[in-house]
């Protein structure tokens, strides 16, 4: 199936919009003095991981449509490296955020995808679901005071990353997407899936990488502008 499936872009665009809104709330708390519950509360804490999981799964699905996941990974990892340097400079380090994670997953899948695709979809997805549960429990239970194990989710005292998506358990979410992608390509999803479209979100989804790179600087300028206006009003 070579035709573009707009619902994938639509869902990715919706995930990106929600991510931008979530980050705006963080900036409002951090720089405007908004109440902490604007960003962190029981509802948002759960939704954050649900939408992040959807975004990661969609990235896995898209990997089945990519001509070269290895090339994609280099672009994403380069952007991730720039983000690490910039965030260290402003003392809000992102060591292994969503772009680092996706870049590594794309690279690994680009190197192993042909072998992984040999496994039947049903059993493979079942194994991935078990992997999510087991690895989440493992990371939450085991503590390893070993540097660089943070890539797998095992942090050490003093480890800080303002955005953090380790390989465990998220790699299994990505892999689930790759197997679902194969089913989509085979045309086995409902017919509406291949025709549905929400143009606004679809357009955002097609440019998700650019939006992700630019949204935080834009939000920062916006929030600082609001802060300046509020400070000016308070003085007046």
Image (cartoon, helix red, strand yellow):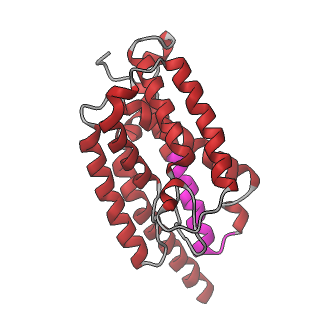
Q: 147 or 5: which is nearer to us?
A: 147
| Residue 136: image location, x then y, percent | 64, 47
User: Which percent across, then down, holds residue 46?
Assistant: 69, 48
Dominant secondary-structure state across the stretch colored magenta: helix
Observer-nearest residue: 37 or 149? Answer: 149
| Count of labels in the image | 0
User: Can the viewer see residue 201?
Assistant: no
- Residue farthest to the bottom? 235
Residue 26, above or below 211: below
Front-lying residue, 176 or 135: 135
Quadrant location of the C terminus? bottom right
- Examine the structure image and report whether residue 187 is included in the region drawn in magenta: no
Q: Residue at x 57, y 83 (%)?
A: 231
Figure check: 47 above or below 66: below
Quarter residue 233 falls in: bottom right
Q: Residue at horizontal 63%, vertical 69%?
A: 29
Residue 106 visible? The answer is yes
Residue segment shown in magenta: 17-34
Residue 31 painted magenta: yes
Q: Residue 5 appears at what percent x and percent y? A: 38, 23
Determine whether, in the image, residue 18 is placed left or right of residue 33: left
Q: Residue at x 50, y 60 (%)?
A: 149
The quarter of the picture where the N terminus appears is top left
Percent x, y of residue 52: 55, 45
């Amino acid at each position: 199936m070579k035709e573009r499936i707009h619902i994938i872009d639509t869902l990715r665009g919706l995930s990106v919009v929600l991510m931008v809104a979530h980050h705006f709330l963080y900036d409002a708390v951090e720089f405007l003095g908004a109440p902490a519950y604007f960003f962190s509360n029981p509802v948002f804490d759960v939704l954050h991981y649900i939408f992040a999981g959807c975004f990661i799964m969609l990235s896995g699905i898209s990997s089945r449509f990519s001509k070269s996941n290895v090339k994609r990974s280099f672009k994403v990892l380069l952007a991730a490296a720039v983000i690490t340097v910039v965030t260290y400079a402003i003392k809000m380090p992102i060591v292994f955020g969503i772009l680092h994670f996706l870049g590594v997953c794309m690279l690994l899948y680009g190197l192993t995808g042909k072998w992984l695709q040999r496994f039947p979809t049903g059993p493979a997805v079942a194994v991935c679901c078990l992997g999510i549960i087991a690895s989440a429990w493992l990371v939450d239970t085991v503590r390893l005071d070993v540097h660089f194990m943070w890539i797998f989710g095992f942090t050490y005292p003093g480890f800080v990353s303002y955005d953090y998506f380790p390989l465990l358990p998220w790699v299994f979410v990505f892999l689930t997407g790759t197997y679902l992608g194969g089913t989509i390509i085979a045309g086995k999803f409902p017919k509406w899936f291949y025709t549905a479209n929400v143009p606004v979100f679809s357009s955002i989804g097609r440019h998700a990488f650019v939006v992700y790179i630019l949204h935080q600087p834009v939000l920062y300028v916006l929030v600082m502008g609001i802060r300046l206006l509020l400070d000016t009003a308070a003085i007046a």
